[in-house]
């Protein structure tokens, strides 16, 4: 796929809106209907941490690693995992954290480009927003 700077697939945008990009239009970066073959590499009951690989998905010559989400602060237990064909939104595994909260793991994760600065730190002057300047 070929993407623009906001991870919009350009071919899908061109099919929908024509050759010129329309302001404010977006398309999902991944096809939500396509299925991918997930091959698990872990077993239920294993203790894992954020970033640990639980399986892989092959895409042409690339092998994508499916990991425990980075937002998980501590150890988690893998309570269920299944191999087979899944869309990017279907859960391939379920994990439970130390507090007992269960979470589904899918083939895709959101990785924010920018996290906002905490408002309380801005108010207290402990951090600042810096904007680019022109010269």
Image (cartoon, rainbow, N blue to C red):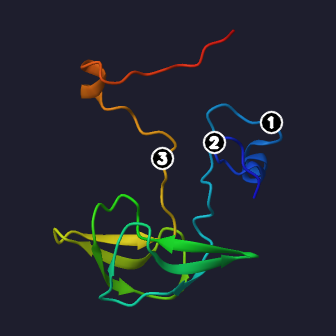
Residue 48 at what x, y percent from top left? 34, 76
Image quarter of the N terminus: bottom right
Circle on res. 112: 3
Q: Dot 2: what SS? A: loop
- Compared with 134, 20 (above or below) is below
Q: CA distance from mark 2 to mark 3?
A: 12 Å
Q: Residues within 10 Å of mark 2 (few under 14, many from 20)?
A: few
Q: CA distance from mark 3 to mark 1?
A: 27 Å
Q: Residues within 10 Å of mark 1 (few under 14, many from 20)?
A: few
Circle on res. 76: none
Residue 101 at what x, y percent from top left? 21, 69
Residue 108 at what x, y percent from top left? 51, 65
Q: CA distance from mark 2 to mark 1?
A: 16 Å
Earlier residue among tags 3 and 1: 1
Marks 3, 1: nearer the viewer: 3
Circle on res. 6: 2
Circle on res. 20: 1
Q: Residue at x 61, y 72 (%)?
A: 64
């Amino acid at each position: 796929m070929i993407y623009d700077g906001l991870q919009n697939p350009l071919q899908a945008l061109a099919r929908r809106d024509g050759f010129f990009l329309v302001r404010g239009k977006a398309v999902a970066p991944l096809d939500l209907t396509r299925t991918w073959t997930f091959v698990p590499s872990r077993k239920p009951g294993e203790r894992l941490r954020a970033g640990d690989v639980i399986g892989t998905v092959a895409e042409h010559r690339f092998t994508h690693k499916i990991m425990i989400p980075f937002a998980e602060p501590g150890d988690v237990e893998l309570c269920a995992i299944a191999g087979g064909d899944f869309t990017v939104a279907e859960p391939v595994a379920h994990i439970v954290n130390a507090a007992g909260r269960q979470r589904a793991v899918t083939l895709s994760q959101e990785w924010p480009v920018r996290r906002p600065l905490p408002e309380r730190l801005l108010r207290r002057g402990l951090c600042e927003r810096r904007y680019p300047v022109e010269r």
